[in-house]
């Protein structure tokens, strides 16, 4: 489970649903996925993951099933091993 | 290149990042000034002066007046669930000195016990739980406050986040394009992080493991506050293990099914207030409650059984995020 923490967001498969172009791209060197402003596509469902609620990029048309108040459904996971992300966390939120 | 700037205040560790050293020092000065005014344990703080002059008007600084005004506003908005008038209840549980001193004087709490306790939430359904009568009068002309008999101010549930937010607001007003203020784990950030474009924030495991339960990648104005029943807990004589989040309906430590809650908002003070409300209410009542009343707020809650609950609007605050579904504590640090 611990290894999954770093499974982020890269190489996400995209499916063009309406307008015929890929909406999600991986930003080289940053290890993150961004949404195109013209996006009318959704990320295609991938293999479910047991241990994480995971979502790559905000999208109103995400296939992730969520109820009215919260989500406990594992969203799609990336089927390809991601490269090491170079991002670092600046700090953490915690009780003090 | 700006380096993270750390200092201690309000009984916790502060971190200021992404701003110039001069700006970080300005934050430190603001926080230190606020600490002197708001502390419940400093005899000459303005909060204590009000507490010691029951039923009398006490002139306060504009800063303290603004804090009290916002605290009363939060009290009303949450129908008393966020309650800054529980100083006497806190004293009754033994929290009448700084937590370091309290820890020295009391037996250690087995924090894993918090996970095994039965949540009382489902036995006590209370929709509108507390009095809406505010026991504090504020005079805007005289910048003065008067507290009713039978109450004591304790602004510990708002002061830290409120002060950090004000400090961040001050920098933004001066044109500082991006930055981060971390007040002991309550975090406000704005703009783009200079090296990677987004600010990376972990959400700590309530049981203290090194592995975060969530990673959030944020930009723009985002505030997040985390409350936990585990962090500040102690053995109270005759009561056993207690913690510092008081349920205003009972006057004792909250007994819901939530170990820890993180709330995301645009204002750190608001995030701090509602994180405490959710700890008090628990998941069954609290999550629908906050969704109905404050649908723009997002949350990540950790239940006693390890299940992690996430609101469906994290995208409002995190450009990307990953949250565990469940946390297992096979080998907790505590």
Image (cartoon, coloured by chain):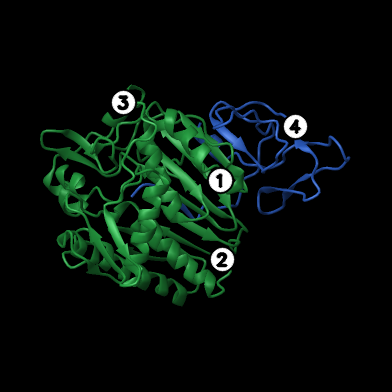
The residue nearer to you, when weighing B251 against B39, is: B251
Confirm or deny contact between disc 2 and disc 3 (CB under 8 A).
no
- Residue B194 at x, y percent in the picture: 59, 64
Left or right of residue B120: residue B234: left
The residue nearer to you, when weighing B50 against B298, is: B50
Select label 2 or label 4 by which is in front: 2
Which chain is green in the rendering? B
In the rendered image, residues at marks 4 and 3 fall on the same chain: no
Q: What secondary structure is marked by label 4?
A: loop
Q: What residue is shown with label 3? A: B120
Mark-to-mark CA distance, 2 and 1: 23 Å
Which chain is blue in the rendering? A
Mark-to-mark CA distance, 2 and 4: 34 Å
In the rendered image, residues at marks 2 and 1 fall on the same chain: yes
Confirm or deny contact between disc 2 and disc 4 (CB under 8 A).
no
Q: Which mark is residue B178?
A: 2
- Residue A87 at x, y percent in the picture: 58, 52
Q: What residue is shown with label 1? A: B296
Mark-to-mark CA distance, 1 and 3: 28 Å
- Residue B168 at x, y percent in the picture: 47, 65
The residue nearer to you, when weighing B59 against B46, is: B59
Q: What residue is shown with label 4? A: A44
Quadrant of image for the N terminus of chain B = bottom right
Earlier sequence position, callout 2 versus callout 1: 2
Give neighbour class at mark 4: few <14, some 14-19, many 20+ (Cα, 10 Å).
Answer: some
């Amino acid at each position: 489970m611990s290894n999954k923490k770093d499974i982020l967001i890269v190489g996400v498969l995209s499916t063009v649903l309406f307008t015929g172009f890929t909406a999600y791209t991986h930003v080289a060197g940053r290890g993150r996925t961004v949404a195109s402003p013209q996006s009318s596509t959704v990320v295609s469902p991938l293999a479910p993951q047991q241990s994480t609620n995971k979502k790559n990029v905000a999208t109103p048309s995400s296939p992730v099933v969520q109820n009215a108040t919260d989500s406990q459904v594992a969203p799609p996971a990336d089927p390809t091993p991601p490269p090491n992300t170079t991002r670092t966390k600046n700090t953490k939120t915690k009780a003090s | 290149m700006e380096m993270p700037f750390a200092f201690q205040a309000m009984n916790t560790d502060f971190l200021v990042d992404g701003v110039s050293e001069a700006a970080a020092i300005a934050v430190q000065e603001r926080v230190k000034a606020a600490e002197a005014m708001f502390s419940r344990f400093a005899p000459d703080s303005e909060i204590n002066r009000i507490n010691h002059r029951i039923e009398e008007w006490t002139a306060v600084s504009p800063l303290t007046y603004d804090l009290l005004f916002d605290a009363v506003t939060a009290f009303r908005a949450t129908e008393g669930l966020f309650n800054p008038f529980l100083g006497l209840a806190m004293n009754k549980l033994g929290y009448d000195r700084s937590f370091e001193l309290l820890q020295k004087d009391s037996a250690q709490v087995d924090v894993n016990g918090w996970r095994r306790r039965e949540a009382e939430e489902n036995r006590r359904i209370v929709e509108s739980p507390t009095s809406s009568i505010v026991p504090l009068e504020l005079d805007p002309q005289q910048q003065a406050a008067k507290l009713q008999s039978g109450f004591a101010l304790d602004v510990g549930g708002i002061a830290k986040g409120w002060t950090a937010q004000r400090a961040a607001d001050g920098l933004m007003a001066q044109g500082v394009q991006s930055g981060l203020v971390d007040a002991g784990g309550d975090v406000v950030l704005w703009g783009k992080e200079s090296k990677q474009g987004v600010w990376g924030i972990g959400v700590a495991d309530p049981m203290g493991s090194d592995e975060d339960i969530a990673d959030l990648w944020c930009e723009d104005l985002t505030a997040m506050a985390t409350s936990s029943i585990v962090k500040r807990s102690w053995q109270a004589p005759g009561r056993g293990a207690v913690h510092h989040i008081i349920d205003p309906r009972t006057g004792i430590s909250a007994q819901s099914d939530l170990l820890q809650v993180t709330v995301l908002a645009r204002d750190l003070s608001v995030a701090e207030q509602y994180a405490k409300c959710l700890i008090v209410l628990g998941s069954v009542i609290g999550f629908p409650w906050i969704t109905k009343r404050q649908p723009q707020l997002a949350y990540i809650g950790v239940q006693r059984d390890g299940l992690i609950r996430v609101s469906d609007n994290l995208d409002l605050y995190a450009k990307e995020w990953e949250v565990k579904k469940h946390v297992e504590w096979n080998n907790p640090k505590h």
